[in-house]
Image (cartoon, rainbow, N blue to C red):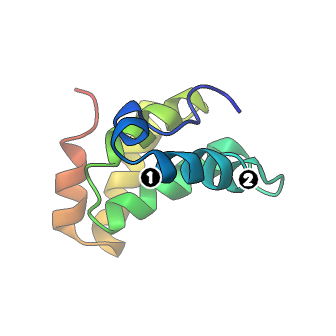
Amino acid sequence: MRPSLSAPAVMKTKTPKLAELTDRILFGDLWQRPHLSPRDRSLITVAALIAQSRLEQLPFHLALAKEHGVREEELAEVVTHLAFYAGWPAAASALTRLEP
């Protein structure tokens, strides 16, 4: 497992079992399945977080998406596209998490 695909330090400190499950199941199994590329998984994850207004998780996954080759322009396009599918407020809130 790559270091970027690891539970955040705060999770490891405060909820070690959740961190273990995150590393072993989420990042160790689900993210490693061969049928979608890491890039595709990142785009899907970012879109789902925006659609559900899970903004606290977005910075981690935006950075991971960039590691997986997603360009800033593509992330901006995801936000724009989701304004019509997930709602304007969700897209406008996500916009604040994109780099200037």
| Placement of the C terminus among the 4 image quadrants | top left
Q: Is residue 95 left or right of residue 14?
A: left
Q: Nearer the viewer, residue 8 or 96?
A: 8
The residue depicted at 61 percent of the width and 54 percent of the height is 26
Say above or below: 51 vs 20. Answer: below
Q: Secondary structure at mark 1?
A: helix
The residue depicted at 24 percent of the width and 40 percent of the height is 97
Residue, disc 1: 46
| Placement of the N terminus among the 4 image quadrants | top right
The residue depicted at 67 percent of the width and 28 percent of the height is 2
Q: Nearer the viewer, residue 17 or 4?
A: 17
Q: For mark 2, does the 10 Å Cα neighbourhood hold few (<14), some (14 to 19), or many (20 or more) residues?
A: few
Outermost right residue: 34
**Three-letter amino acid code at the position of disc 2:** Asp
Q: Are marks 2 and 1 in contact (CB under 8 Å)?
A: no
x, y percent for residue 86? 32, 72
